[in-house]
Image (tube, helix red, strand yellow):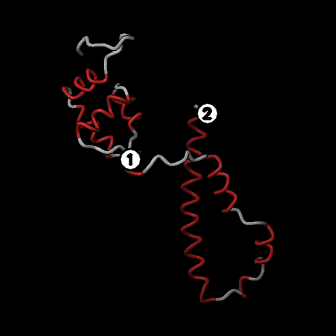
């Protein structure tokens, strides 16, 4: 990389952009951007500054993922998971009402309910398995 630096001794955005471009970085930037990575994530992966990545976006005629979908508000994933779990666990009274009364259900709707519950069980099993995997990763 050339010796052109900012006052802090760090390469300028233009210098880093030029160096990455020489190494085929434009393709990497384009690819990561198309995969939905944000500019700061691309910069971190490629060892660039975020300003350099944004400069490359302009030079390459790319729109950042933030510009394509909007920044939006930050989502509290813990709250989302709390609400998700709360909605899939039925209150005990629901199960008590059904217990022993399945024969009284509308037979025409049973197949649809069974199908929906099977899909839900598959989805819930996937979520549970991912959480288990995370627990094992944390314990390692």
Q: Quadrant of residue 54?
A: top left
Q: Secondary structure at mark 2?
A: helix
- The residue where tag 1 is placed is 67
Measured along the vertical axis of the image, is residue 121 above or below residue 18? below
Q: Residues within 10 Å of mark 2 (few under 14, many from 20)?
A: few
| Residue in the foreground of this view, choosing between 40 and 83 | 40
Residue at 60 percent across and 85 percent down: it is: 109
- Indicate the secondary structure of the residue bearing disc 1: helix
Which one is earlier in the sequence, the residue at label 1 or at label 2? 1
Foreground pick, 28 / 114: 28
Q: Dots 1 and 2: beta carbons under 8 Å? A: no
Image coordinates of residue 14 in percent, x first then y, are 27, 24
User: Residue 17 bears which disc, if any?
Assistant: none
Left or right: residue 95 versus residue 17 is right
Looking at the image, is 89 positioned above or below residue 42?
below
Percent position of residue 71, x then y: 47, 46
Q: Residue at x 27, y 38 (%)?
A: 58
Task: State whether residue 72 is above or below residue 42.
Answer: below
Which residue is depicted at the point 25% across and 11% down?
Answer: 3
Residue at 21% x, 29% y: name it.
21
Does residue 127 appear to the left or right of 33 in the view shown? right
* Residue position marked by numbered label 2 in the rendering: 139
């Amino acid at each position: 990389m050339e010796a052109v630096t900012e006052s802090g001794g760090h390469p300028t955005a233009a210098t880093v952009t030029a160096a990455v471009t020489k190494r085929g970085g434009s393709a990497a930037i384009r690819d990561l951007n198309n995969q939905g990575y944000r500019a700061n994530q691309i910069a971190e992966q490629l060892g660039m500054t975020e300003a350099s990545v944004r400069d490359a976006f302009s030079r390459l005629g790319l729109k950042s993922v933030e510009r394509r979908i909007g920044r939006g508000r930050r989502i509290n994933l813990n709250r989302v998971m709390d609400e998700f779990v709360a909605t899939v666990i039925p209150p005990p009274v629901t199960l008590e009402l059904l217990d022993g009364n399945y024969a009284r259900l509308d037979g025409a709707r049973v197949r649809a309910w069974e199908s929906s519950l099977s899909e839900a069980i598959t989805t819930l099993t996937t979520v549970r398995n991912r959480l288990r995997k995370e627990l094992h990763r944390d314990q390692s």
